Amino acid sequence: MRGKKRRVIRIVLTVFSVVFAVGFLLPTVLTVTNSFMSQTEISASYGAVFGGDSESYISDTVHLKLIPDLVSLSQYITVLFRSPEYLLKFWNSVILVVPIVVFQAGVAAFAAYSFSRYRGRFREILLFAYIILMLMPYQVTLVPNYLMSNWLNILDTNWSIWLPGIVSPFSVFLLTKFMRRVPVSYVEAAKLEGANEWQIFSRIYLPMCKGILYSVAILVFLDYWNMVEQPIILLSDMEKYPLSVYLSKINSEEVGVAFAVAVIYMIPPLLLFLHGEKQLIEGIGQSEGIKG
Amino acid sequence: MGKKPSINLKSRERLVSWAFLAPSFIGVMVFFIIPFIVVILYSFVDSPITKDFVFLDNYAALLQNKSFQTAAKNTLTFSVIAVPLSVLLALGLAVLLEQKIPLKSQFRTFFLSPIMVPIASIVLIWQVLFHQNGTVNLFFSNFGADGVDWLKSDYSQIVIVILFLWRNLGYHMILFMAGLSHIPNELIEVARIEGASSWAIFYKVKIRYLSPTILFVTILSIINSFKVFREVYLLTGDYPYGPLYLLQHFMNNMFRSLDYQKLSAAAVLMAIVITALIAILFIAENRYGKDVEG
């Protein structure tokens, strides 16, 4: 009796999970499958939403399709070979994001090492300031960023996004939390062997933090790959916009292409996610508990 | 004589440790702290050029500004709806994946997958779903409901809440799963042996142990709810329908007109509100979770 009840609960929970999983996956899957539609099919299916070439066969409702009638690579061919502007914007995204990820992780690893090896009053206050700063939304932080970029005369250049991004304190906090758990005995042992600070950092701390560094890098990448606020405020030249902003400006005649561009834009984070999922889940788990 | 080298070593070590901190420290000072102090000063003067002290005039003007009021109200409404929902649902998902169901790690991956999808990539589908002639209306029309253009209606915030939950639940779920795994197993065993029901174990033992995680997820949700401008901007552009006009839209307009007084007053005000909010959450958690920590 009890066993039967348990089995029923189990089935209900499983069904529940499946429904949720479908809901979570569907938007992504639909975007991917729709990118393989020809322009005609896109117009026929979504003309009611996006307008497009307003004549003839467009019905007045949409047909959301999971699978295209005819798999076509034409949108991808257009993006890759006929309209270089999308690839240029994609390149803008890469140029903006990659240096931030690499240098933020580097700067943060140094800072976190310093925060975890030495704990003075000043450092504790500073770390607290970092945490508060980390919690501030762009509505707050972009104002000081803008002022400084203005004074340094780097507005409307990539530097105005790179520099604040590189020194942003998010990864410092996560890495410090992790590094503070490195046992002191390791450091003492290394010192007895005559290791200097740089060697302790590069031979003990860094190897131990590889996983967390990777997951911090993924999180930073995901955040900046989505950047919107910084470019629209700090850059006035649309040519420099990353694809994250530009994609929404594609006009309605090019919806088919937009699906293909959307999928191409997904590829780098998707690869990172698939490759680093284990570290990412561990890393997010580590960040749990802001106080510890 | 014998002591001198060791003092040198200590002070050298100190110097090195400062060198490690320097790049981050200088950067944070230059791009955040120092200009923010200037922002505070700007918020009390009538213009960055004449620098006449006007005390709280800028703040008064800001609070009386109709656009600011709308933006603040909308942002607040969104956070009040989205934050509790995301905390509760994420906790629900974490508990769900604690049960004995097949393919657990696959489900975990699926729930987390939206964080890797760029927002810009997903807005097209969202538009297809919630347009006047979109799929959701098509579905409801089967029941005889009249369609609405969701993003241009009073329900527009609902669309954004759904998008927000879709993107953030997985991440928050992982945090709760980590929190749940830190609860000592013996404690739950003891409760079970003493005849506590699973429900009692959940809300008497687990929830109390989870209170730091709940605090963290709540703070994170609040922060993310301020970031939802991204979704709104990519879906609706610079000039969204009324309920979607958020604080960041207001800030963008102030940047465009270079209204330094309102910009700086708004930034300072928001910094104060957020700091106060987080302090309150910390104090509340400290009271509630005191007896289970350390």
Image (cartoon, rainbow, N blue to C red):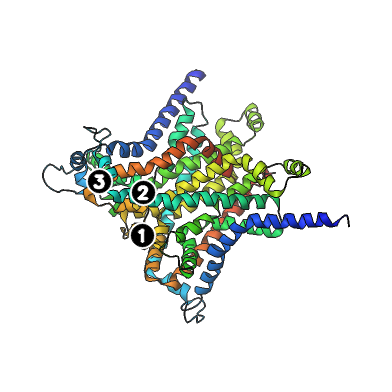
Q: Residue at x 84, y 57 (%)?
A: B4
Q: Tally the marks.
A: 3
Identify the subunit bearing mark 1.
B
- Residue that carries the numbered disc 1 in the rendered image: B245
Relative image position of residue B66 (x, y in whole percent): 37, 68
- Residue that carries the numbered disc 3 in the rendered image: A82
Amino acid at dot 1: Tyr
Amino acid at dot 3: Arg
* Element assignment for label 3: helix
Label 2, label 1: how far apart the Cα atoms are: 28 Å
Q: Residue at x 51, y 19 (%)?
A: A2
B102 left or right of B120? right
* Element assignment for label 1: loop
Label 2, label 3: how far apart the Cα atoms are: 15 Å
Look at the picture and state if B31 lies above or below A268.
below
Relative image position of residue B281 (x, y in whole percent): 57, 53
A151 left or right of B144? right
For the residues tagged 2 and 1, is the chain the same? no
Dot 1: few (<14), some (14–19), or many (≥20) neighbours within 10 Å? many
- Residue that carries the numbered disc 2 in the rendered image: A90
Residue nearer the viewer, B260 or A190: A190
For the residues tagged 2 and 3, is the chain the same? yes
Q: Are marks 2 and 1 in contact (CB under 8 Å)?
A: no
Identify the subunit bearing mark 3.
A
Among the 4 quarters of the image, the one containing residue B205: top right
Amino acid at dot 2: Phe
For the residues tagged 1 and 3, is the chain the same? no
